[in-house]
Image: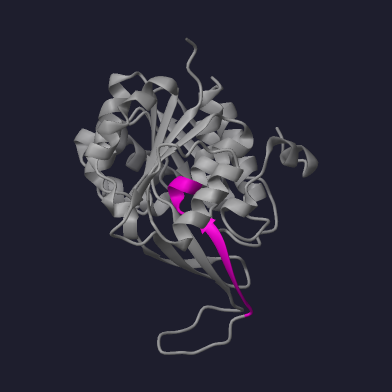
Amino acid sequence: MKREGVLVIGSANMDLVISVEKFPQPGETIFGKKFEMFPGGKGANQAVCCAKLGAKTFFLGRMGNDDFGKSLSKNMKKEGVDIHHLLIDENENTGTALITVEGKGENEIVVISGSNMNLSPDDVESKKEIFKEVKVVITQLEIPIFTILEAARIAKQNGNIFILNPAPGLELSEKLLSLVDYLTPNETELELLSGISVKDEKSIEMAAEELLNKGVKNVIVTMGEKGAYLLSKERKEIFPAKKIKVVDSTGAGDAFNGAIAYALSNGEEIGKAIQLANSVAAFAVTKMGAQSSLPRLEDLELYKLAN
């Protein structure tokens, strides 16, 4: 049986978004322009991105038995994500993110993990049959590290492509890194993971080399408006970002990662996958919210962002 599709193991949050002209200083009270609620969480965002682009997408995570959880799961199902393996936590609230977006589109985020941090290695083990149905497994760092390690272990056993989006940034063991096919840090996360100060292209190469020496197969460094840098033992190449007006950068990294997972699940070559991911991320920053800003393939054609 030909394997295709994506398993996303990760977080789901309700994003509470406040728009302001500028970020407040410590102790300062300011007036906001608007308050909105959007479905979010890195795992759920990446799952919705994959599904909207057209991948058969499974989501494994935990939500609380509350209004936020019901709203999040309903939205994921509407967007085409298979949520049959979603776990409901009766003793914890659904994850929440408090997001402030300033006039230039930059954001500040506080995450309350809630039920996301109750997703256990046993939960993943109990769902290991799904790994046999998909080509790509992707996860992030908004769930416990031991759970991620179990996901990586089972992915390796099943011959899946394993993508780790190391966000938010944490130090990671060599044991986990050695199981990663594609690691997708931003520059700050790359510095934390490698212990090498990242200032320019040369230092990015040195930092990525440190991770490659620890067993990571490919490092894709996301560099915002500068694009993405692919580094492996065989290849070093920068893929320029699309030039576009930023409205809200929330979820841009998730759009990029979801698109990479989608493309690799279709057997796409990694360079082409990154070009698509740059286009999807560019589209995502033109609209407010995370999942609500994610495109379908026809949207990229409409906005002339398709490659």
Membership of 55 in magenta stretch: no
Position above or below: 107 against 46: below
Tell me residue 29's x, y (percent). 49, 90
Q: Residue at x 24, y 34 (%)?
A: 150
Tell me residue 139's x, y (percent). 38, 40
Query: Considering depth in this image, is 266 or 243 the residue closer to the camera?
Result: 266
Membership of 42 in magenta stretch: yes
Where the C terminus falls, by quadrant? top right
Q: Residue at x 69, y 50 (%)?
A: 243
Q: Residue at x 60, y 44 (%)?
A: 78
Q: Quadrant of residue 297?
A: top right
Tell me residue 300's x, y (percent). 72, 40
Does the image show residue 44? Answer: yes
Q: Which residues are magenta?
A: 33-44
Residue sticking out furthest to the top: 1
Position above or below: 37 against 81: below
Direction from residue 242 to residue 139 in the image, left or right: left
